[in-house]
Amino acid sequence: MYTIFDLPKIPKHLILSVEEVLELDNKFTGLSNNYSTHNVQDELKDYLQLMFPEHQFFRYQLLKGNIPIHIDVSRDIAINYIIDAGGSNVSTAWYDDTRTTAIESVVFQPNIWHSIRTDIPHNVNNITGQRFAITITKGEDKKLLNKATREREEYDKLINTSSKNGD
Ligand SMILES: [Fe+2]
């Protein structure tokens, strides 16, 4: 369900603070107050692009509270790098198709590159603070071209735009 990579740690000066990241646009198209993603700034993008030349999306990810069991909409695999785990025993778990039985679980340490399967039901448990990570996606895959997904994204965008306009 996951692979640990032997890759260098990201230099600290390239990583923005949570406060700075929250100032960046939220790229997550789903409806959640507990989850947001933000394209990394250009300086970090250039650094990560050299490390992962075939990948396209480089984002900060902020998670709070319980992340319910889900399958990622737009990707089968994610490459992640935890900056702040968000607690002392935060675990990522994968489930069988019934979504009731965990089949594997792991506590990822900060500053270690790894990949996870995101096409199998999974969640994140025991977040007590705010989990802060970098998440990398290879590119738009076939699922994003799926009509229902596109329509949902357009709907979410519309909702976000109209609520902003209503403020
Ligand atoms: Fe996920």
Image: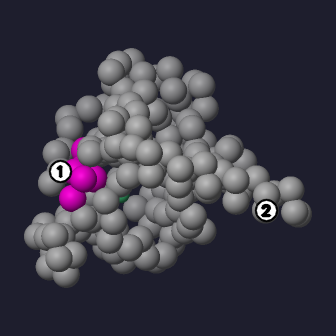
Q: Quadrant of ligand 1?
A: bottom left
Compared with residue 7, is residue 22 higher up or lower down, i.e. above or below? below
Is 4 colored magenta in this rendering?
no
Residue beneath the point at 70% across and 59% down: 159
Along the line of sight, the residue nearer the viewer: 108 or 69:
69
Please state which of the two labelled residues, at mark 1 or mark 2, is closer to the viewer.
Answer: 2
Along the line of sight, the residue nearer the viewer: 9 or 164:
164
Left or right, residue 84 beside residue 55: right
Compared with residue 167, is residue 15 higher up or lower down, i.e. above or below? above
Compared with residue 121, is residue 72 higher up or lower down, i.e. above or below? above
Amino acid under disc 2: Ser
Q: Which residue is mark 2?
A: 163
Figure quadrant of the N terminus:
bottom left
Along the line of sight, the residue nearer the viewer: 14 or 142:
142
Query: Helix, strand or loop at disc 2?
Result: helix
Amino acid under disc 1: Tyr
Which residues are drawn in magenta?
115-120
Mark 1 touches mark 2? (CB < 8 Å)? no
Q: Position of residue 10 (x, y in %)?
A: 42, 34
Pointer 2 local density, CA inside 10 Å: few below 14, some 14–19, many at least 20 = few
